[in-house]
Image (spheres, helix red, strand yellow):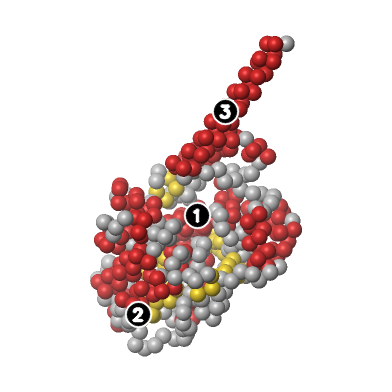
Amino acid sequence: MKKMLFSLLAVILLYVSLELCSLLGLGLLKRVRNLEYKPVLTTVLSPDHLKTLQDLINGKATYLMHSPMLGWSIKPNGFWQDLYRANSKGIRANKEYQFSPDEKIIRVATFGDSFTHGEEVKNDDTWQEQLNRLDHNLEVINFGVGGYGLDQSFLRYKTEGKIYHPHIVLIGFMQENINRSVNVFRPFYTEGLPLTKPRFIVEDDALILLPNPLTDLTDYKKLLNNPAPLLSQFGRNDFHFSARSKASVFDVSPSFRILKLIYQKLYARYDDKSIYKGGYLNTKAEAFVITRKLFDGFYAEAQHNNSLPIIVLFPCREDIQGYFKYKTKVYAPLINYFVSEHYRYIDLLDAFEKHAQSVPLKDLFVQDHYSSLGNSIVAQGLLDYLTENRLLNPQGIQSSIHKKQGSM
């Protein structure tokens, strides 16, 4: 009996030690490698998401709103604290815009995610407003929306942007956005708004739109009341739903969580479908193929509407750190594609290398997004490009619209 009790005690102590070591390991991975076990919820919504949806349904949200086509957008005359203000059309601005630009100015329409929107700074500190102040002949309009994928930006241009007849269309992109091209329900990919979005697939080498699954705000009441069937429906067309670990009753065990986290990272590293491969974007991944096609469509659409498209690549904090230290770019495969297609593009890492080599990284960011100083470097980099390429007058723009970059 004593031997049995001793053996049982030894097993219990071993199990407790394993769990404590696993718990310590999870903490170290989060602090040192920024790796955290975050499983996909497949049958329930988190408390934060429940509250966010209730606020949206009850009209308590002051800045973002549900959009039947885009998933979400900016509220007309929306505001958030003392940072963000929108005009009557849901464009981030302190002024209204006529649909046709004044003859004396060059209108630049900008589309993209939170780096285009200018998250974490006031309206006047966004790179668009700073660019306006650098050259008063420019009128730069901010159509950026936080959390957007390239697909949503493209659709916003087609439904809301092109009617403003911009001379130049800036297509903003930050490499992390590629994950959003294969996402339907945002929480399957990352934290944030618990809303669905449209996405595209590629069939027979053509883009096919899968519309936003929940086109009416009242549809979210069904999600609140009975989430499991709808979450399963969203997951059928969501890459992250399939690729990420699912929540389980065994997640109470730290050792179980750390094993799932390690497996997920190893699977992502060696799986041919993984979005990243060897520290770069994986050109064979569905996300890359769709993103490439979205750039093709966006670029061609702007040209068709007699605007000059220019792709703008925004580096995040990790991109700047990696480039300054190793001279590597995660999004190098995209640049190679732009070069092969003769697309005009601006890699803002060049601007940060030129103007911010000696600036501490903490001064360039608020938290995850550019500070006023970081946005000023973006504005200067864009103005440098427009000046060097003689794109500050209508004649220069018009002659460049259908001419491939690099051709004579």
Q: Are marks 1 and 2 in contact (CB under 8 Å)?
A: no
Amino acid type for the residue under numbered disc 1: Asn
Give the spatial CA distance, label 1 vs label 2.
33 Å
Q: Which residue is mark 2?
A: 138
Mark 1 or 3, nearer chain start: 3
Horizontal relation, residue 248 to residue 97: left or right: right
> Which mark's residue is nearer the viewer, 3 or 2?
3
Mark 3 or 2, nearer chain start: 3
Horizontal relation, residue 353 to residue 14: left or right: left
Give the residue displayed 30% in from the left and 51% down from the top.
324
**Circle 1 residues within 10 Å: few <14, some 14–19, many ≥20:** some
Mark 1 or 2, nearer chain start: 2
Q: Which residue is mark 1?
A: 179
Horizontal relation, residue 364 to residue 234: left or right: left
Amino acid type for the residue under numbered disc 2: Leu
Of residue 279 and residue 271, the one placed in the foreground of this image is 279
Give the image location of residue 271, x and y in percent.
49, 42
Of residue 155 and residue 284, the one placed in the foreground of this image is 155
At mark 3, the secondary structure is helix
Q: Quadrant of residue 6?
A: top right
**Circle 3 residues within 10 Å: few <14, some 14–19, many ≥20:** some
Give the image location of residue 310, x and y in percent.
37, 69
Of residue 97 and residue 342, the one placed in the foreground of this image is 97
**Circle 2 residues within 10 Å: few <14, some 14–19, many ≥20:** many
Q: Is residue 96 above or below residue 147?
A: below
How many tags in the picture?
Answer: 3
Q: Which residue is mark 3?
A: 18
Quadrant housing the C terminus = bottom left
Give the image location of residue 265, x and y in percent.
50, 40
